[in-house]
Amino acid sequence: MGGHVLILGGARSGKTGFAERLAMRAGERPLYLATAQALDDEMRERVRLHQQQRHKRFATLEEPLALATALKAAARAHDVILVDCLTLWISNLLGSGRDVAAAVDELAATLPRLTAARILLVSNEVGLGIVPDNPLARTFRDLAGAAHQRLAEICDEVHFIVAGLPLTLKGPRLTESALEPPVPEG
């Protein structure tokens, strides 16, 4: 089955599509664990489009805050879990006044114990741009960067997606067949 995977990239880089293709090849009972909170019309439409475009074999679970707990429960019924995305999860934690570092510690402690399911973690790389001009944005950037470093240490594979193309940072180099879309359901 392989170990856990961290998939990083910029906004609209193709990281979710890449993660979905990996998930469809990694197991028979995939789960899409969504961290987004649809708090306005634009976000509700984004969520709707994401769900519509998703392969029909995915079950879906929405969990904006208790990620480690949701993963533990989901790993009992699913052999591959795609988490999309960690940066929204971090935003949710910050917005609710939670301790982000403690939540990342809990996630990092949980992942190695989840051996029955392969976990694919999708996240936006936010540290490549300019230094944000306000304290909250700088805090978010710093927390996301620290989370990525921590999770990259314990994941077996780390991929960085640019213009839809993966750059393998850690783990085995992917073959062309791993990048092809899954066969549609008939």
Image (cartoon, rainbow, N blue to C red):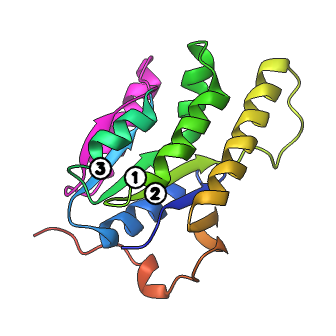
**Amino acid type assigned to the residue bearing label 2 in the image:** Leu
Span of residues in magenta: 37-65
Count residues near mark 1 (Cα–Cα under 10 Å), then give few for <14, some for 14-19, many for 20+: many
Which residue is farthest top? 97
Which is nearer the N-term, disc 2 or disc 1? 1
User: Residue 88 or 55: which is nearer the viewer?
Assistant: 88
The residue located at (33%, 47%) in the rendering is 32
Q: Is residue 29 left or right of residue 2?
A: left
Judging from the image, what secondary structure is the residue with disc 1 in? strand
Q: CA distance from mark 2 to mark 3?
A: 12 Å
The residue located at (48%, 51%) in the rendering is 111
Report the residue marked by disc 1: 82
Please tell me whether residue 153 belongs to the stretch shown in magenta.
no
Q: Is residue 149 left or right of residue 4?
A: right
Q: Percent x, y for residue 170?
A: 65, 72
Q: Percent x, y for residue 45?
A: 38, 31
Asked if the residues shown at circle 2 and circle 3 are in contact, with their CB atoms under 8 angstroms apart, the answer is: no
Q: How many marks?
A: 3
Residue 83 versus residue 141 in the image, above or below: below
**Amino acid type assigned to the residue bearing label 3 in the image:** Ala
Q: Is residue 119 left or right of residue 90?
A: left
Report the residue marked by disc 2: 120
Report the residue marked by disc 3: 75
Asked if the residues shown at circle 2 and circle 1 are in contact, with their CB atoms under 8 angstroms apart, the answer is: yes
Residue 6 versus residue 137 in the image, above or below: below
Q: Which mark is residue 10?
A: none
Looking at the rendered image, the disc whose residue lies closer to the viewer, 1 or 3, is 3
Please tell me whether residue 60 belongs to the stretch shown in magenta.
yes
Which is nearer the N-term, disc 2 or disc 3? 3
